[in-house]
Image (cartoon, rainbow, N blue to C red):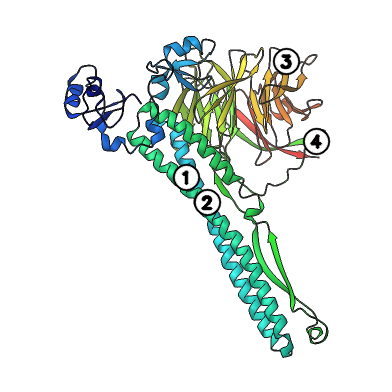
Amino acid sequence: MASSANICGICDLRNISKPSTVWCPECDEGLCNSCQEHHSLSKATRQHSILPIAEYRKLPSDIIQISQSCCKHDEKLILYCKDHENPCCGKCVVETHKHCKEIVSLDDIMKNAKNSVSFHETEATLTELIENIRKIRNAHKENLADLSKKRKAIELEIQQTRLLIDKHLDKIQKNLVDEIHGAGDKESEKIRLSIKTLDEMEQSLSEYQLKIVNVKKYASDIQAFMAIKKIETDVAKEEECLLSYVPEEKMNNVTISCKLSEPIQAFLGNTQTFGEVVIETTPRRFTLSHKKSMQAQMMIPTIQSMSIENMTTRLHQRVNTESKNVRGCCILPNKNMVFACYDQKSLTFLQSDGSKDAVVKLPAAVDLAYIEAYDSIAVTSSIENEKYIRIIDLHNKKIKNISVNTKNFGIAAVQDSLVYCTNSNNIRMISLRNELVKNIVYADISTFAYVETFQDLIYYTNTNTDDVTCCDMKGTVKWKFAFQNMTMIPLGITIDNTGNVYVTTGNNNVIVISPDGKRYKELLSSRDDLRNPIALYFDRRTNKLLVSNRSRDAVIYDIVQE
């Protein structure tokens, strides 16, 4: 902060102490009434937005401390280093960031900071986390009520049984009831402590919500930009804490029951206890909303492995795409289909029965990927002056452009990020939360290379070297499948639920490669109505393979084991 908010910065330089009445975020100083009038008339500052000093003081103290000047050189922050995620002045660039590749204008990157994806995502995450806390707390309260009902039911059972036996059992009855109450109270206290912890978590998250509201209203753009970075990190920690809460024993459902001794007549003689208190803890099916993976299911079904040796196909459906040169395709969760039409520069949407739904015109369309976390389609472009990835919202078909400074080909979605092939001999990943880009794979990658992801692995085709490569998210190669000595070249690629790799080739066929990259099998050929296919997509929800011919039509096959 350049000056104290309590006194006028201009008067202070003249050794005059006058209280400030307004704050100018761009000048980063307070102004008295007289200086405010001059400030509003001066050509250099008349366009500045000011706010009453009382409203400025509503900003959190850590936000107010964010300065627009370099703390090292006392110069205005004008640039932003994406490599270090840090704003800097001109001297900083020369001294510290001269080897960094991603130096951009700070004005450009903080433009519309309050309306950025990070802001919206953090607000949505806060709302989501608080809702999850309420779900867990309600479950605990239901558990408390159930414990109380079960406890009363056991007491009634004991009382009814006691009427049939001698009075000498009164003492052991009392001991059993006390034991039940003691055990129930002990477990109830554990649950109350959990609820208290959840209340504290909700209070903390609510404070972040209030902080964001005030930042959006009163902070400058740079303050907003720097604040959301910190808040986003803090909220991610809170989110991780909450998501790890459920799978642990803290979320187990606690019940209370009593096993009565049989036969009851044995109590009259030798039995010294009325029964045995049993505390049973059983897992409870519980789902937290989590936008990054749509639904964080607590119980995941087991997926049976599919051997390529016993794999075969069964024709499911033929569809007329009425499209030319289809380069990308996918099946949506509602079973509708989307095709990227390279020659027609458009996306064609078909209903599940094959009827046309919609056509979205674009400057260019190569490959596409469905982004489950945002219910959107990402589309790449290979045109020199169209270096964008376009995001199409499936609800309203609105288009958002993300500049990536490269021509792009194959693309795949992984949670809230995109992995894509570029014309710069590398494969990159871009986060949709903050649009930061990082390189993953450096290789001699061909034009129109395709990429797919599965679990924590990346798979891509390369016609320059005629192979399929599997690597991890750091680019470390796990295996390569070479097409040398074959009359085929690798084109489109998709992965099934167990890691089998499906690839179209330049020989009117589809081959499937084993998860270890050591074996392969021809799965489809021209005998199966394939005509120069490039695009294909495996729907992991239904075990169906969509293969699109270059022109006019596509075929859906069921993948089955013989």
**Residue bearing mark 1:** 205
**Residue bearing mark 3:** 466
On the image, the x and y values in percent for residue 133 come to: 52, 51
- The answer to whether the residues at label 2 and label 1 have Cβ atoms under 8 Å apart is yes
**Quadrant assignment, res 505:** top right
- What amino acid is labelled 4 in the image? Ser
- SS label for mark 2: helix
User: Measuring 26% from the left and 34% from the top, which residue is drawn there?
Assistant: 53
On the image, the x and y values in percent for residue 454 come to: 67, 32
Residue 425 is marked as none
- What amino acid is labelled 2 in the image? Ile
| Nearer to the camera, 468 or 434 | 434
| Left or right: 52, with 454 as reference point | left
Of badges 1 and 4, nearer the viewer stands 1
- SS label for mark 1: helix
Of badges 2 and 1, nearer the viewer stands 1
Tell me how far mark 2 sits from mark 3, CA to CA.
52 Å
**Residue bearing mark 2:** 133
